[in-house]
Amino acid sequence: MKRILILFAHPKFEQSKTNKALVCKVINREGVTFHDLYEHYPDFNIDVLREKKLLQQHDIVIWHHPFYWYNCPPLMKQWIDVVLEFGWAYGPDGNALKNKKCLNVITTGGSRELYCSEGNNHYSVNEFLRPFEQTARLCGMEYLPPFAVMGTHGISQPQLQRHAEQYDLLIWSLKTDAGFGALSDCSFLNDTPLLNKKNKL
Ligand SMILES: Cc1cc2nc3c(=O)[nH]c(=O)nc-3n(C[C@H](O)[C@H](O)[C@H](O)COP(=O)(O)O)c2cc1C
């Protein structure tokens, strides 16, 4: 079984609706380490050695966060800046993360239709996530398409529950290496047949 590290960053988790529902579903799953960065490092003083050890103990890394100004909240960026060191995560001898899998799990206030060239946000979510994709690649990791819960402001309770169940299924699929099929044309893991076996939203 693959071990999954969920790196979670939400500056206002106590006020969260969407991420709370997602986190509740997966936090206690076997083989999953849920790591709340704002809880551990409220002063942004990240223990780099500890984070490196955690990374080494897992096969799959998830950057789980709400979308803030088309990006991650600042503590996650700080985590990337200080933990992914040259000579360890990348560079000639930087092989520590090689062949691990990596993906973003995000929630966005804007709905999917707004994230395209004709929409208010002009670019797709995948385009906004390019720095994460390339960061993962530079570290020799396999970057998977994101899992995204979008349009959070207008989401109903049943829809939220369905998203949380899909996230749970995603975790199970990653853990058991179930395989998502061809991902080259896939923008979101949400859309893979594996995560849509039962009733659709
Ligand atoms: C500071 C801030 C910046 C935000 N920036 C974006 C954004 O760029 N795009 C977007 O779609 N939603 C944006 N949002 C909305 C959040 O992504 C949304 O409220 C969150 O994902 C909902 O999850 P929660 O219920 O767990 O807080 C922003 C919210 C805040 C507070």
Image (spheres, rainbow, N blue to C red):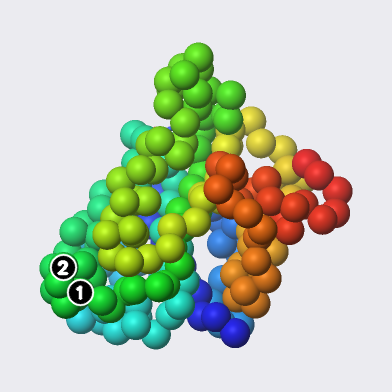
Residue type marked 1: Gly
Residue at 73% x, 43% y is 159
Left-right relation of 119 to 46: right
Tell me if mark 1 has few (under 14), some (14-19) or many (20+) residues whose alpha carbon lies within 10 angstroms of its own.
some
- When asked about the image quadrant of residue 41, the answer is bottom left
Tell me where residue 149 appears, x and y as whole percent: 58, 43
Left-right relation of 76 to 57: left
Residue at 20% x, 81% y is 49
User: According to the image, label 1 marks what residue?
Assistant: 94
Residue 171, relative to residue 184: is it above or below?
below
Q: Are marks 1 and 2 in contact (CB under 8 Å)?
A: yes
Q: Residue furthest top?
A: 118
Disc 1 under 8 Å from ligand 1? The reply is: no
Residue toward you, 38 or 67? 67
Residue type marked 2: Gly
Label annotation for residue 138: none
- When asked about the image quadrant of residue 102, the answer is bottom left
Tell me if mark 2 has few (under 14), some (14-19) or many (20+) residues whose alpha carbon lies within 10 angstroms of its own.
few
Left-right relation of 177 to 43: right
Residue at 57% x, 29% y is 111
Tell me where residue 59 appears, x and y as whole percent: 45, 77
User: According to the image, label 2 marks what residue?
Assistant: 91
Check disc 2 and report its element: helix, strand or loop. loop
Left-right relation of 169 to 14: right
Q: Residue furthest right?
A: 199
Residue toward you, 119 or 51? 119
Tell me where residue 156 appears, x and y as whole percent: 72, 38
**Which image quarter is the N terminus in?**
bottom right
Res. 165 visible in picture: no
Tell me where residue 198 appears, x and y as whole percent: 85, 54
Check disc 1 and report its element: helix, strand or loop. loop
Number of residue marks: 2
